[in-house]
Image (spheres, helix red, strand yellow):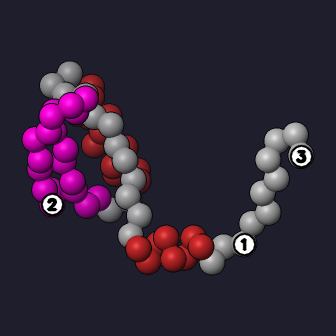
Amino acid sequence: MEAFYYAFGDRDGFVICEMPDNVASAAAALLVNASGAAAVKTVVLLTPEELDQATKKVGDYRPPGK
């Protein structure tokens, strides 16, 4: 666990942790949700370097109907 924050609003708290991969993150979320002790929603964060890599990928997007 990197950090834990209490919050006001829709969520009571936020936990920031570094996991080895998305599968490990999903397994942890499933385990906590199954216990009934808390409801977990995961959000994958990108590093600035990962976003830089994403901007270099070329794609062709055409909106539906066009």
Mark 3 residue element: loop
Asked if disc 2 and disc 3 are in contact, CB closer than 8 Å, the reply is no
**Cα–Cα span, label 1 and label 2:** 34 Å
- Magenta residues (range): 1-19
Q: Residue at x 41, y 74 (%)?
A: 48
**Residue 49: x percent and y percent?**
44, 77
- Residue at which label 1 appears: 58
In reply to whether residue 18 is colored magenta, the answer given is: yes
What amino acid type should be assigned to the residue bearing mark 2?
Glu
Mark in front: 2 vs 3: 3
**Residue 13: x percent and y percent?**
16, 39
Q: Is residue 34 left or right of residue 8?
A: right
Mark 2 residue element: loop
Quadrant of the snapshot with the N terminus: bottom left
Label 2 vs 3, first from the N-terminus: 2
Q: Residue at x 27, y 34 (%)?
A: 40
Mark 1 residue element: loop
In reply to whether residue 48 is colored magenta, the answer given is: no
Relative to residue 1, is residue 27 depicted above or below?
Answer: above
**Cα–Cα span, label 3 and label 1:** 20 Å
- Residue at which label 2 appears: 2
Quadrant position of residue 32: top left
Relative to residue 31, is residue 2 depicted above or below?
Answer: below
What amino acid type should be assigned to the residue bearing mark 3?
Lys
Label 1 vs 2, first from the N-terminus: 2
What amino acid type should be assigned to the residue bearing mark 1?
Val
Q: Residues within 10 Å of mark 1 (few under 14, many from 20)?
A: few
Q: Residue at x 33, y 37 (%)?
A: 41
